[in-house]
Structure formats: C-alpha cells, structure tokens
Image: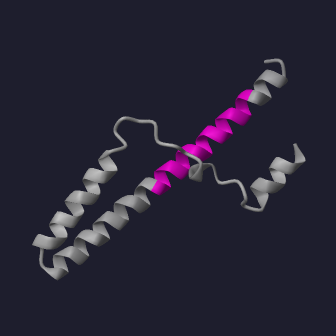
Amino acid sequence: MKPILEELYYGRIRPFERIVHQDPDHPLNRKIYDLKLALQEKLPAEDVQAMEELVDLCCDSGVQESAASFEYGVKFGVLMMMKVLGGE
C-alpha cells in the first residue's frame, strides 16, 4: 500500500486526468466550442472578453464542484471501510 500513498502524496496520481468520457453527452464540448467561435466572430472585442471571463468562471466553478465531490466520495469510502472493518 505504501507505493500508492507515495504516488498520491507526490502528486503523481491525478484521478481527474484519467477520466475517459463514455457519456453520450460528451459531444456537447464540441458544440460549446463551436458556439464560442461563432460568438467570437459576431461580438465586439469587449463582449468577447466578457464572454471569455464568463466561460473561465464557469469552468472554475465546475472544477471546484468536482473537487468537492471527489473529496466527499473519498471520505465516504473511508468511513464505509472503517465501519466494515470495525465490524459494524
């Protein structure tokens, strides 16, 4: 068990980088990208900048939510293991 803990500690394990989208909605990313390009062509420069900021904020929010969900999942999994191994 030690090697996996070392890998995690030193940041060599990044579960979020190993996720392979198998969801049929994954093509939505392409649609988002295409719409973003279309808007960039139509909007004035300052509106494009505001749109970019909005997209960045939405992405940051999604990352924070994913990280919180991951943290909760790990804690919940550890708690379950403690209950199982503790005989409860």
Q: Residue furthest top?
A: 88
Query: 80 or 60, which is in the foreground?
Result: 60
Q: Is residue 20 left or right of residue 56?
A: right
Q: Residue furthest right?
A: 2
First to last magenta residue range:
63-80
**Image spot of residue 39 (x, y percent):** 16, 66
Give the total number of marks visible in the rendering: 0
Write down the quadrant of residue 53 in the picture.
bottom left
Which residue is at 20% across, 58% downward?
A: 35
Which residue is at 55% across, 51% downward?
A: 67
Q: Overall secondary structure of the magenta stretch?
A: helix
Which residue is at 18% across, 81% downward?
A: 46
**Image spot of residue 83 (x, y percent):** 77, 25
- Whether residue 62 is in magenta: the answer is no
- Whether residue 68 is in magenta: the answer is yes
Query: 7 or 82, which is in the foreground?
Result: 7
> From the image, which quarter does the C terminus lie in?
top right
**Image spot of residue 23 (x, y percent):** 41, 36
Colouring of the image: one colour
Which residue is at 73% across, 35% downward?
A: 78
Figure check: 45 above or below 18? below
Q: Residue furthest bottom?
A: 45
Q: Is residue 9 left or right of residue 18?
A: right
Q: Is residue 13 left or right of residue 40?
A: right
Write down the quadrant of residue 59 in the picture.
bottom left
**Image spot of residue 13 (x, y percent):** 70, 54
> From the image, which quarter does the N terminus lie in?
top right
